[in-house]
Structure formats: structure tokens, C-alpha cells
Image: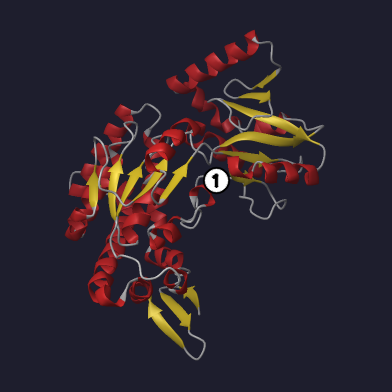
Amino acid sequence: MWSLTSGSLVFVDFGIRSIQYTKSQYYAYFCAKVTPKGILNKYMSDHNKTFNAFVKLGGFLRDFRNSDAERDRWAGKLELAVTAAGHKNGWFNTENILFALANWGELLREEKLAAWLSPYRTDQNEKSGPRAAHKNVALIMAGNIPLVGFHDFLSVLITGHGAMIKLSSNDDVLLPCIADFLIAHEPDLAGKIKFVEGRIEGFDAVIATGSNNTARYFEHYFGKGPNIIRKNRNSVAVLTGTENTEQLRSLGHDIFRYYGLGCRSVSKLFVPEEYDFDTFFESIYSFRSLIDQVKYANNYDYNKAVYLMSEFKLLDNGFLILKEDESHSSPIASVFYERYSSISALRAKLEKDRDRLQCVVASGLFKEEVPFGETQTPALSDYADGIDTVDFLLKI
């Protein structure tokens, strides 16, 4: 069996015949394939409702910037949430929050959701017997960038489970507002979305995101049951010296979006031994206004002072510090760099460090590379740490 998405239709080939579906009909087919027959009718209906609620959310997020907050009740609520999120977390400026909302607006299109779900087939699930239609999944969310845990939230609900959500205090405003929108448009979701402030209990599986430090505690408390536990990861870029100005400017978005706080933010550059950084600095100069942000400027000043007192050799353009270092994880307002002698040697090094990397940005060098400027706009199938969340949820 295979499926092909085209416009508003999905074509499914069953070997002896092919059938044309609308996207909503295909989602009903998907639900049928992953749901035990005895409860098929009820849960096909529930899954379709959830699917359609997220499609409506996508339309709302796409229109949000052009909405009249005084006339549109939900636009007004989200506008207040954006403002409140910025007040609670100084790293969440309006530009970055709107960027995150717009990204999700694009991803929550009917055709993209259907294409994302289409590869999940029944034979993957029947091997371990029928699965229960509804489990409670605890989501321990990070708070480093706006809506960083939304993909997990979406994945849990779209597979028919309930979400028990423990929010980070750094990002506890936006998702509850979005959840209220979903429940208003699909009331049955009220029983599947629960925000937990204290101890989480009564869950069947866990998806927890944190640092290498917190992961040890997560593994201690949640390691006995089905779980996905995420640790620190970083993203790197590989330059050859042949990049043009536009590619390097796009790399600036990979470095500076969300002030470099995301796991998909480029925190290290690999460059040839004789690489000259002048063109790189010239290409990213348009991002210089970052230094006007007080928290960013404080980090820039502090890190620069520490490096200088330690007598490290630095490259500096007034808003970004480059330091030669073998580590992948650089502080805010700085990026590490490392020189390489050959692409083959670098390829072996990156393969060795695979479990510590989220993205490798390059142009025509690696099989799973990310193009310049695209780290902060992942597709629905670009799973964090390379772990297929939907497959995990279909098997619990």
C-alpha cells in the first residue's frame, strides 16, 4: 500500500485498485487502520473531530496577525497571551512568539497533517496486538522557546490519547490559551487536556524534555514505563568557504532566532583550516540590533569579559563572539568554531557525535543536512532527537 498527496486529495493504492480520498476521508481511513475494530466507529469520529479542531487552529493562527483583536474574541485572547508571555519571560519577545505561531499556522493545514499521518500503517501495530484507544500521556515540557512542547501536545491528541501537561514556568501562558481555543471548537477535548501544577499521577506513558541534568531525574522517576526522555542537543553548521552572502545571511537566522536558545539553533561552526570570517561577519551584520535587547547584551558583555580575562583568542563584531572550541554548546551571544582538514574526517566526527546533535546545516555535503536558514522551520515529521513520537504513541 502507498499513498500520494495531491492538492486537497489523497490517492491510496491497495495493489489491485487505487482509491481517491479527500484529506478528511483519508484521516478517517488512517484512524480505522490504527484502531481496534470493536471501538472503531466511536474513535474514528473522535479522531476526525480532533483532526478538524487542529485544522481550525491552523487557520486561526494564519489569520491572527491580520485579525482585529477588538472584534475577534479569540484574537484578543491570544494577543493578551502574547503580551503576558513576554512579560513573564524576557526572552519571549513579540517577534519570536509571532514567528512560532505563524510556523504552526503553516504546519496545521489539512493537507500537511494528512501527509504527516499517512505513513503510519496497521501492520506496524498489529504485530504487538491491538492497542488501547486512549491512554494518559504525561508531557513534561521545556520552556526555552515559545511553544517548544506543542509538537508533543499535537502528537498525543492526534493519536487519540489524553495529555497531562506539566508546563515550564518559562512558557506557561501560550499553550493554555491555544488549548482553550481547541476545546471551544471541539468540546470533547476538554476531557483529554489537563494542565497539572503539582505532582503528575495516573499516567500511562511519559514524554519529558529537559537537560542532561534533569534527564537523570526523569529516568529515575519515569524510566520503568513507556517513555521518551530528551536531553541536551545542539545544532552545527558546516562551511566550505564557497557560500554566498545569501546563504550566510540565512545562517544568521539559524543562529539568532530565539536568541540561540533552541536545540535547533546553530551554536557551532565547522570551517576549513584557512577560512576567513570576514564575509561571514559582513553577511550577518543585519542582525546587529540584537545587541539592543538588554538580556542579550548582558550575556554578550559577561561572556566577552570572561573570555578576555581567561586570555582566549576571540573574533568579535560587536554583537556576536566567535571562539575556537571543540564543544558544541556555546553560551548566548557566542558561537564556537572548529577547523577541519577534510570533509571525510568531519563526516566521521559528526557521525560519532550523532546523539548530541539535532541539526547539521550544510549545502550538498551530508545526507540528512538542513539547508541554510531552515533549522527553525521544521516539518511535522522532523522529530526531536530523531525519535518518532507518533510511532511511540501508537504502540503504548
Query: Residue tagged by mark 1?
Result: 375
Residue 298 relative to residue 191: left or right: right
Front one among 244 and 266: 266
Q: Is residue 208 visible?
A: yes
Q: Is residue 148 visible?
A: no
Q: Position of residue 15 (x, y in %)?
A: 52, 87
Among the 4 quarters of the image, the one containing residue 130: bottom left
Q: Position of residue 195 (x, y in %)?
A: 24, 43
Front one among 258 and 213: 213
The extreme bottom residue here reads 16
Q: Position of residue 336 (x, y in %)?
A: 65, 28
Q: Secondary structure at mark 1?
A: loop
Count of numbered tags: 1
- Is 327 rendered above or below residue 44? above
Q: Residue at x 64, y 11 (%)?
A: 308
Among the 4 quarters of the image, the one containing residue 361: top right
Amino acid type indicated by mark 1? Thr
Q: Residue at x 38, y 35 (%)?
A: 143
Q: Residue at x 53, y 41 (%)?
A: 264
Q: Position of residue 238 (x, y in %)?
A: 69, 41
- Is 221 rendered above or below residue 116? above
Q: Quadrant of the C terminus?
A: bottom left
The extreme front residue here reads 224
Among the 4 quarters of the image, the one containing residue 183: bottom left
Q: Residue at x 72, y 51 (%)?
A: 365
Front one among 61 and 358: 358
Q: Residues within 10 Å of mark 1 (few under 14, many from 20)?
A: many
- Is 14 rendered above or below residue 368? below
The extreme top residue here reads 309
